Image (cartoon, helix red, strand yellow):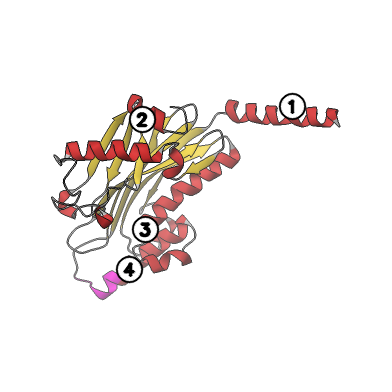
Amino acid sequence: MKKIALLLLILISISSCQKRTTPLTFKTETLKATTLGHCADGICPIIEIEKIKAFGREHFADTINNAVDQVLLNNLVIAPEEEPDIKTLDQALEHFISSYRVYKSDFPEAGTEYEINSTSQVSYNGAQLLSIKFENYTYWGGAHGYGSTTYLNFDKDAETSLNNEALFKDYTGFLKLAETQFRNQKKLSAEENINSTGFYFENDVFALPNAIGFTENEMVLVYNPYEIASYADGQTILKFKFSEVRDFLKLDL
């Protein structure tokens, strides 16, 4: 029994070492209207996607690549009720193209074009934490398109994606730090209502944004248009040096 337990311990140790030593590499895949098969049989919207793709550690690479595809899928589907029926990036692209063709059929004189423009890259690759940044722009007609920044974060040891709360061991403490910086940046005193100058935090309570990511030496919080302010106000970005946030985070930087 002891020998079996020792053998299992050795196998776990070997597996853990392999996870750390097997290199995780990245390449960029380009998707354009001029090269997509879906565009071969008719008109197409503007499609310019530079999509990062992971290789090397099979299970982890699949986790990363599926998450990357999901971000792009979310940007290609405008109606939330349609998302459950669209499972893959290829289906999302096909849907985007077919929606554009219906639009051009209904409004042949319309000069506007549907568009998606997206780039993604590794913004931080540390011992434990991997962060991928997206810059996305989509246009579905109307007064203007929509540009946004998105981050994906991953635990390299556990080979899992991390939601925002999973980044922190002291979420409440970091929330206080972020609110202090937000108020300083927006010239709001600690006593003023957080929405007193036109922001619209839910229930007048400060909250972290959806987009939280990392660069080589900073943690970045991005409030995209409409998240806490109007489209005209653009993004609000908060940046923190690693030395300011290290004690609040679960993973080593």
Judging by the rendered image, the residue that carries numbered circle 4 is 101
Task: Give the amino acid at mark 2.
Answer: Val
Indicate which label's residue lies in the foreground, 3 or 1.
Answer: 1
Tell me if residue 187 comes above or below residue 206 in the rendering. Answer: above
Extreme residue in the front direction: 191
Task: Give the amino acid at mark 4.
Answer: Arg
Q: Secondary structure at mark 2?
A: helix
Q: Is residue 108 magenta?
A: yes
Q: Badges 3 and 1: C-beta atoms under 8 Å apart?
A: no
Disc 3 crowd, CA 10 A, few/some/many (<14, 14-19, 20+): many
Indicate which label's residue lies in the foreground, 3 or 4.
Answer: 3
Mark closer to the chain start, 1 or 2: 1
Give the number of the disc on residue 10: 1
Image quadrant where residue 153 sits: top left
Location of residue 81 in the rendering, given as x and y in whole percent from the top left corner: 40, 69
| CA separation in Å, label 3 and label 1 | 46 Å
